[in-house]
Image: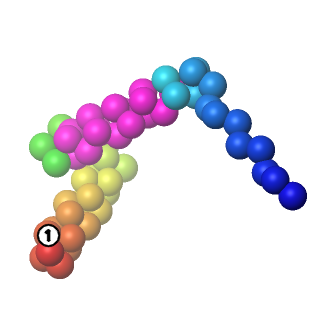
C-alpha cells in the first residue's frame, strides 16, 4: 500500500512562514523584557528566562 503525500498549498507555506516570524519576534521580545507588564506576561518572561538559563547551563 503506497501512501500519497500531497505537498502543502502555497497559503499553508505562507502561513507557516508568518507563524515562524511571529515566534522569532516574540522570543526576542521575551529575551529583552518587552512583552508587557501584565501578570501573564511576567510569568511567561520568568519561564522563558529560567528555561533559557537552564539550556545555556546544559550546553
Q: Magenta-highlighted stretch: main secondary structure?
A: helix
Q: Quadrant of the C terminus?
A: bottom left
Which residue is situated farthest in the right direction here? 1
- The image shows residue 24, relative to residue 9, as above or below, that is below
Q: Residue at x 28, y 39 (%)?
A: 24
Q: Does residue 37 appear in the picture of this structure?
A: no
Q: Residue at x 14, y 69 (%)?
A: 56
Q: Quadrant of the N terminus?
A: bottom right
Residue 16 % position (x, y): 48, 33
Give the residue number, with chain letter if any, for mark 1. Answer: 56
In terms of image quadrants, where is residue 36?
Answer: top left
* 28 within the magenta span: yes
Q: Does residue 51 appear in the picture of this structure?
A: yes
In terms of image quadrants, where is residue 57?
Answer: bottom left
- The image shows residue 46, relative to residue 15, as above or below, that is below
Q: Residues within 10 Å of mark 1 (few under 14, many from 20)?
A: few
Specify whether 18 is left or right of 42: right
Give whichever of 10, 15 is nearer the camera: 10
SS class of the residue under badge 1?
A: helix
Residue 22 % position (x, y): 36, 33
Residue 53 % position (x, y): 15, 68
Specify whether 58 is left or right of 48: left
- The image shows residue 49, relative to residue 39, as above or below, that is below
Q: Residue at x 49, y 23 (%)?
A: 14
Give whichever of 34, 22 is nearer the camera: 22
* 7 within the magenta span: no
Q: Residue at x 34, y 32 (%)?
A: 21
Specify whether 32 is left or right of 24: left
* Magenta part of the chain: 15-30
Which residue is situated farthest in the bottom direction here? 58
Amino acid at each position: 500500500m503506497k501512501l500519497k503525500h500531497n505537498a502543502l498549498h502555497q497559503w499553508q507555506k505562507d502561513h507557516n512562514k508568518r507563524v515562524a516570524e511571529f515566534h522569532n519576534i516574540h522570543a526576542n521580545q521575551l529575551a529583552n523584557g518587552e512583552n508587557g507588564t501584565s501578570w501573564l506576561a511576567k510569568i511567561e518572561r520568568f519561564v522563558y528566562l529560567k528555561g533559557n538559563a537552564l539550556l545555556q547551563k546544559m550546553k
